[in-house]
Amino acid sequence: MRIWEIVLRLALIAASTILILYGRVAVWITAPLSIASIAATAELGIRPYATNTVDKLLLICGSVVTGLILVGLILNLTPGGLTRASWTLALLAVSTFTLARCRKLGTHFKRPSRSIDLLTLAIIAALVIVAGAAMLALAGVRQWNKQPLMSFSLVSKSAEKVVVEIHATSFKADYEIVATQQTASVDRYVSKPFEINAGSNGETLTDQVPIERSGRWIIDLETVDHRSVVRELIIDVAD
């Protein structure tokens, strides 16, 4: 492979990765870069196995679709799950590995024919399939990022107070924290109502729950309008 092709491929991979991870660039810029990077990686990976243009197009389409499915299944099993960052880093790893493995292949390009024939239509169809597969993967990531998530966890505890944390994604409602001593229901704390208006980027809140006596406390995160318990913590507080 000639040095100029290696440089162009590295520049495409780097630009696509940086702009996507940066997250503040318009999608009409990042999407074509991502699709071009994926298609270029697939073309390089199948280059030793393609004997003509039609075979190359079919192998590119099949490898892109299969690769995106496999990468998605693998990322779904990781602790971080399917996110824009995990997708981008996974594609970066696949692209750099493919480039390093195939760096000794020859560089060759053919001048396209001007006439619109079956081969030209096949090229157009292949590009549509590749673009559709890439956009489907990106749409899946956006949809995953928008799924509602709510966590209610313990930060610290002492004989006087308990500190809790709320992390929400794609939630909007008014909540309050209700703490009740299990053996003495008269010991009860109700916080002031507060609003959670968390978008796809998430929102994190902390609150202090005063504790009047030791023992087991039940701390609930409740909605103000329906008085329903959304999350619950059971905490043992010692003197």
Image: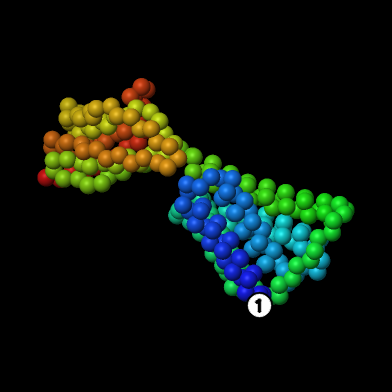
**Between residues 175 and 121, which one lies in front from this camera angle?**
121
Residue indicated by mark 1: 104
Name the quadrant containing residue 162: top left
**Residue occupying the point 64% across, 56% down:** 36
Q: Is residue 58 above or below residue 221?
A: below
**Residue 40 x %, y %:** 66, 61
Regarding residue 150, the answer to whether it shows in the image is: no
Regarding residue 161, the answer to whether it shows in the image is: yes
| Count of number-bearing discs | 1
**Residue 156 x %, y %:** 22, 47
**Residue occupying the point 45% across, 54% down:** 79
Question: Callout 1, which amino acid?
Answer: Lys
Q: Which quarter of the image is occupied by the N terminus?
A: bottom right
Instruction: Give the left or right position of residue 229, taking residue 67 as reference.
Output: left
**Residue occupying the point 33% across, 29% down:** 195
Q: Which quarter of the image is occupied by the C terminus?
A: top left
Instruction: Give the left or right position of residue 206, taking residue 63 as reference.
Output: left
**Between residues 74 and 3, which one lies in front from this camera angle?**
3
**Residue occupying the point 59% across, 73% down:** 100
**Residue 229 x %, y %:** 35, 30
Q: Residue lying farthest bottom? A: 104
**Between residues 177 and 200, which one lies in front from this camera angle?**
200
Q: Residue lying farthest top? A: 225
**Residue 201 x %, y %:** 42, 42
| Way the structure is coloured | rainbow
Q: Is residue 31 above or below residue 7?
A: above
> Is the residue marked by circle 1 packed among few (<14), some (14-19), or many (20+) residues within 10 Å?
few
